[in-house]
């Protein structure tokens, strides 16, 4: 994987040639470019840790492939899916570089770029910046609070024998 700053210029040229500069599609494409490889790497490890015998046992019991995946594999991989969702949300939500370069209109600016606009060359209102920082943090905290029980649920699954 490359650091975003290494490919921002070629990515901007690509987005400009596609004619999607200053659109949400450009941001979606950039976030997908960096989040998808990380998610695939993370989820691959989780799915490889699930014993194949469990899926085969479900199929012997009469479940089809789709039902075995849905009722056996996905519940076991849920902590990995939640971890990937948390990391992806935080990576995309806090992105500054791509939003700064690809978006120029005021109505499409992301929150990190908006907070950056609060800095002024003459006067810096630290109270406003701190309040904005707290407000920006709230969605990430609420998202994590909503899904953390599913993340913690899988931590102790193999801890007790019996």
Image: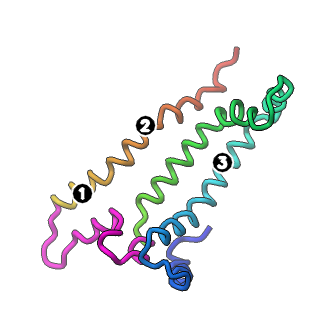
Point out which mark residue 132 bears.
Answer: 1
Outermost right residue: 60
Relative to 2, residue 84 above or below: above
Relative to 52, residue 133 above or below: below
Point out which mark residue 4 bears.
Answer: none
Q: Position of residue 63 (x, y in %)?
A: 79, 28
Which structural element holds mark 2? Answer: helix
Which structural element holds mark 3? Answer: helix
- Give the magenta-colored segment's residue range: 98-126
Q: Position of residue 55 (x, y in %)?
A: 79, 32
At horizontal 52% and vertical 69% (from top left) the residue drawn is 30
On whether residue 113 falls in the magenta region, the answer is yes
On whether residue 99 falls in the magenta region, the answer is yes
At horizontal 24% and vertical 57% (from top left) the residue drawn is 132
Question: 21 or 99, which is in the foreground?
Answer: 21
Relative to 89, residue 51 above or below: above
Point out which mark residue 146 bears.
Answer: 2
Q: Position of residue 4 (x, y in %)?
A: 52, 72
Marked residue nearer the N-terminal end (3 or 1): 3
Point out which mark residue 43 bears.
Answer: 3
Question: 56 or 22, which is in the foreground?
Answer: 22
The C terminus sits in image quarter: top right
Which structural element holds mark 1? Answer: helix
């Amino acid at each position: 994987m490359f650091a975003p700053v290494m490919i921002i210029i070629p990515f901007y040229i690509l987005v400009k040639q596609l004619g999607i500069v200053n659109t949400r599609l450009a941001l979606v494409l950039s976030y997908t470019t960096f989040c998808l490889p990380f998610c695939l790497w993370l989820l691959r490890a989780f799915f490889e840790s699930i014993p194949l015998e469990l899926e085969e046992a479900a199929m012997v019991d009469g479940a089809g492939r789709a039902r075995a995946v849905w009722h056996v594999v996905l519940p076991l991989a849920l902590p990995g899916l939640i971890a990937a969702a948390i990391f992806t949300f935080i990576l995309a939500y806090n992105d500054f570089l791509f939003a700064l370069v690809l978006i120029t209109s005021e109505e499409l600016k992301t929150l990190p770029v908006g907070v950056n606009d609060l800095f002024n060359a003459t006067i810096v209102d630290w109270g406003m910046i701190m309040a904005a920082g707290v407000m920006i943090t709230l969605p990430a905290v609420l998202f994590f609070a909503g899904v953390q029980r599913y993340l913690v649920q899988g931590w102790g699954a193999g801890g007790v024998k019996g």
